[in-house]
Image (cartoon, grey):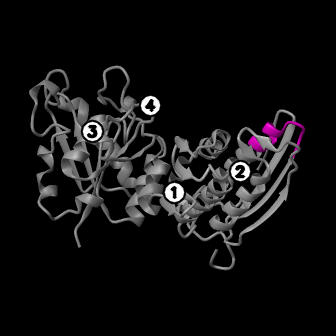
Amino acid sequence: MKKRALFIDRDGTLVIEPPIDYQLDSLEKLEFYPKVIRNLYFIQKNLDFEFVMVTNQDGLGTVSFPEDTFWPAQNKMLEILEGEGIIFDDILIDRSFPEDNAPTRKPRPGMLGKYITGEYDMEHSFVIGDRLTDVELAKNLGCKAIFLQNNIDIPNELKNSCTLQTTDWDAISEFLFAGERKAEIKRTTKETDIYIALNLDGKGNCEISTGLGFFDHMLEQIGKHATIDLTIQVKGDLNVDEHHTIEDTAIALGEAINKALGDKRGIERYGYCLPMDDCLCSVALDFGGRPWLVWDAQFNREKVGDMPTEMFLHFFKSLSDSAKMNLNIKAEGTNEHHKIEGIFKALARALKMAKRRDIFNYELPSTKGII
């Protein structure tokens, strides 16, 4: 079996990069990145990755960055990590300046020759770092990057090399230990042609087009408020009416949610009520594997936007059935738009709560042993 490795940057990833001179050249400047120690320990204890530190230290050993100011902080960092059960298998330091264009300087892979000889499974190895050069290094090595930034856009040419963008080491451990929670569903009938892609651990990015403007708006509430990346593309027989488009979208969306949840280990399982102006809407949810819908919401208008109000019940029934979840939905108020939007937002918040996963308590949330 081939080995796997985590190629981990130092400054800005393991420790906080000093903000003025960007040099960790004293013990006073040594500050660990939040939550990095417990997560490195968890990863090393539970997974089979080798730990490789890969860092650029501009001009180390020159007058601008003497070695005797570098090693005390470096050695103290390693000492603290070792005391917490974290050992690096390899430490690679490039001392060149950017203008030197050295083959050993990240993102160039010159220091990493032994890892690209075929002995290591680069497809399932990762570079973890806070700079785009770390993502580029991953591309050059043939592995994937975990980018420790949230406010930097990844260029198109590097997007396929970045598998996770976060500033939270808990999210890194969860991803490495339990994997992605993504799903794609394609559903084609004589009445509809539907494509859905979702990421339960996304940021709420949505691309939705069903041909029904109000329905698009409601589906976007799910993605946005549940922090689920959601792509929904629907071509339906709207020349007949809205029924098939709404029903089949619910079925496909439920299938995608159920598929992305996987075996449901570590999830909260349950999850919400929220006010929206004059309305109070509650959605109680259980991912227990037994579909059921309780619906207590009345609408006095025939349509809200271009969506028939009779289809709201039908949508949530189809969603509950295909996602294998129990939904209890109630809404009270006078404004029909607010009521239905409140229900969709409450569903989203219930999803966000119930899908939350805890890898430190990675058990099925059931006394039955199966859900």
Query: Which one is closest to the eye, mark 1 or mark 3?
Result: 1
Q: Is residue 73 visible?
A: no
The image shows residue 188, relative to residue 70, as above or below, that is: below
Mark earlier in primary sequence (4, 1): 4
Residue located beneath label 3 in the image: 157
Residue located beneath label 2 in the image: 347
In the picture, measured across the screen, residue 285 lies left or right of residue 177, that is right
- Disc 4 marks a residue whose amino acid type is Asn
- Disc 1 marks a residue whose amino acid type is Asp
Distance of label 1 from label 3 (alpha carbons): 31 Å
Q: Is label 4 in contact with label 1 (beta carbons under 8 Å)? A: no
> SS of the residue at dot 2?
helix
> SS of the residue at dot 3?
helix
Q: Is label 3 in contact with label 4 (beta carbons under 8 Å)? A: no
> SS of the residue at dot 4?
loop
Query: Which one is closest to the eye, mark 3 or mark 4?
Result: 3
Q: Is label 1 in contact with label 3 (beta carbons under 8 Å)? A: no
Mark earlier in primary sequence (3, 4): 4
Quarter holding residue 270: bottom right
> SS of the residue at dot 1?
strand
Residue located beneath label 4 in the image: 151
Residue located beneath label 1 in the image: 193
Q: Is label 2 in contact with label 3 (beta carbons under 8 Å)? A: no
Query: Which one is closest to the eye, mark 4 or mark 1?
Result: 1
- Disc 3 marks a residue whose amino acid type is Glu
Q: How many marks?
A: 4
In the picture, measured across the screen, residue 98 lies left or right of residue 81, that is left
Magenta span dominant secondary structure = helix
Distance of label 4 from label 2 (alpha carbons): 28 Å
